[in-house]
Amino acid sequence: MTSTTTPPTATAATAPPAAWLPVAAVAVTLVFWASAFVAIRHLGHDFSPGALSLGRLLVGALCLGAVALSRGLPRPTGREWVSITVIGVLWFGVYNVALNEGEHRIDAGTAAMLIQVSPVLIAFLAATFLHERFTLYLGIGLALAFGGVGLISLASSEGGGNDVLGVLLCLLSAAVYSVSLILQKPLVARLSALHVTWLACTVGAVACLPFLGQLIDEAGDAPTSSILWVVYLGVFPTAIAFTTYAHALRHMSASSLGVTTYLVPPIAIAMGWLFLDETPAAMAYVGGVLALVGVAVARRKPRTIAEEVSPPA
């Protein structure tokens, strides 16, 4: 009689990871992404937005490439290359430059709250272009989220017109990220998330090469500590945080993981207070809470692809 007992080696190979590993991966991702807002704000004195973007992306692309290539060469189709290129230019290029410039004008906590509006934008774009259902929850969520953004803008305007421009730049970052996720959705169905992220990050670095002269000049004048912070941004919030997020997504439901990123703004606010001695204006807190409530309402069932992903820094 043939035995149906699974060999020990097969059991070990398919054994699930320790229960604490996905939780630890989430914690690492949240802390690194929140810290990125603070690091960007801190580096505003030494690096211009374009130079900082290029420095971060070069470091991130090198780190991601070292891991991605160890898992084989990706083979995107021609159409997939078009999507990867657009994602690289928008998500890694425009997103970073706009966010960096925005954080020259507003504090790290406010920027983190504004970026969290992107899941609502993703849901709206999915309903428009991917024929997902436009629900009552989505409509209410859009209204609440953008009402919150309005309050944040009003709070920022008390400091001058430049602060309002900072709000708009952060919203631009949220918008291009949202468009990128719509394009990325079909890609990760066939290609690994690691390979897609590495290729897009590399495209973003190439798109930011016009800032190479600024990066060289500013790096020469910057203190060593600031250069190390640029390396930190490339290694930890970019390369490692993307990897830990992908690991957590493999072992947790997308909706459960997505909700955890609502912790990024309070962590960023706490870090901004601790390391930069700055906090958002009182009305910005109210607007931030209203915007996050809007995001939560918009993501109520029936689910959309906004539940699949959440924004990085």
Image (cartoon, grey):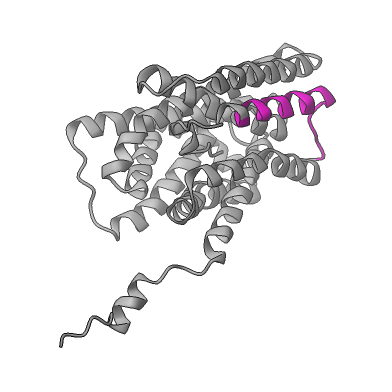
Please identify the quarter of the rendering in which residue 264 is found.
top right
Does residue 184 lie above or below 160 as drawn? below
Which residue is nearer to you in this view: 118 or 236? 118
Q: Main secondary structure of the magenta part?
A: helix
Q: Position of residue 182 (x, y in %)?
A: 39, 28
Drawn side of residue 195 relative to residue 240, left or right: left
Does residue 250 lie above or below 298 as drawn? below
At 72% from the left and 28% from the top, the residue drawn is 288
Read off the magenta span.
277-296
Q: Is residue 286 visible?
A: yes
At 74% from the left and 39% from the top, the residue drawn is 269
Q: Position of residue 82 (x, y in %)?
A: 26, 28
At 40% from the left and 37% from the top, the residue drawn is 205
Q: Is residue 29 magenta?
A: no
Q: Position of residue 296 (x, y in %)?
A: 62, 32
Drawn side of residue 145 relative to residue 60, left or right: right
Which residue is nearer to you in this view: 64 or 291? 291
User: What residue occupies the far bottom of the structure in this picture?
Assistant: 1
